[in-house]
Image (tube, rainbow, N blue to C red):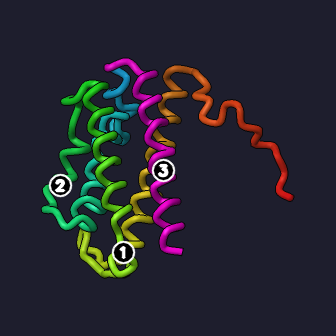
């Protein structure tokens, strides 16, 4: 059960990462930092935010490294990283998080820790990160489709109309 949870959590993060990279590659540098309106974030903000979230919840909290996150800065940015830097940043963050998750014991998964002022188990932190990462991946894909008017073909070549048996 433990291994299945770890494997599926890693699978979901590693499945979403290339989708974000694909979207970044479809957008111009200006579109990466473009905000749809004053109350929304740019793709650049979302990528930086995802890095901060994954680092805080997994790399720092579960990996027992110092928490240096400044969350408000993630949303205040209007630029600061180009496409390649964002791709490198998110890729390295996920690679590091995967290493931490792979190394979790059952006791680590059940240990209660404090993150963002919440007391939660390692399992809860991993579920939070996977859900949060998927949520913002969807926002990034939506924005990319909206501004580029393209089909990202995330499931290209897969028949999603197959019925359950």
Marker disc for residue 69: 2
Residue 133 at x, y percent in the picture: 42, 51
**Left or right: where 19 falls relative to 162:** left
Asked which secondary structure carries label 1, the reply is loop
Answer whether labels 2 and 3 touch (C-beta < 8 Å): no
Answer whether labels 1 and 2 touch (C-beta < 8 Å): no
Marker disc for residue 105: 1
Q: Quadrant of residue 33?
A: top left
The residue lying at 46 percent from left, 21 percent from top is 26
Whether residue 30 is situated above or below residue 134 in the rendered picture: above
The residue lying at 51 percent from left, 45 percent from top is 15
Residue neighbourhood size for the residue with mark 1, other residues' Cα within 10 Å, grouped as few (<14), some (14–19), many (≥20): some
Answer whether labels 3 and 1 touch (C-beta < 8 Å): no
**Left or right: where 27 falls relative to 80:** right
- Quarter of the picture containing the N terminus is bottom right
- In reply to whether residue 141 is colored magenta, the answer given is no
Residue topped by disc 3: 134
Q: Quadrant of residue 4?
A: bottom right
Asked which secondary structure carries label 2, the reply is loop
Q: Front-most of 128 and 7?
A: 7
Which portion, as a residue range, is magenta? 1-29
Q: How far separated are the C-alphas under marks 2 and 3? A: 20 Å
The residue lying at 35 percent from left, 69 percent from top is 104
Comparing marks 3 and 1, which lies closer to the viewer?
1
Q: Earlier in the sequence, mark 1 or mark 2?
A: 2
The residue lying at 34 percent from left, 48 percent from top is 94
């Amino acid at each position: 059960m433990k291994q299945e949870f770890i494997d599926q959590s890693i699978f979901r993060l590693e499945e979403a990462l290339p989708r974000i990279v694909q979207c970044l590659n479809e957008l111009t540098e200006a579109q990466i930092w473009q905000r749809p309106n004053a109350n929304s974030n740019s793709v650049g903000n979302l990528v930086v935010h995802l890095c901060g979230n994954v680092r805080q919840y997994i790399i720092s909290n579960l990996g027992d490294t110092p928490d240096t996150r400044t969350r408000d800065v993630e949303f205040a940015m209007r630029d600061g990283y180009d496409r390649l830097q964002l791709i490198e940043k998110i890729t390295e963050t996920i690679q590091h998080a995967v290493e931490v998750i792979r190394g979790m014991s059952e006791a680590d998964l059940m240990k209660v820790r404090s993150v963002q002022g919440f007391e939660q188990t390692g399992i809860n932190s991993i579920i939070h990160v996977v859900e949060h990462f998927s949520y913002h991946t969807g926002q990034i894909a939506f924005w990319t489709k909206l501004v580029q008017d393209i089909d990202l073909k995330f499931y290209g070549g897969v028949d999603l109309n197959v019925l359950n048996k």
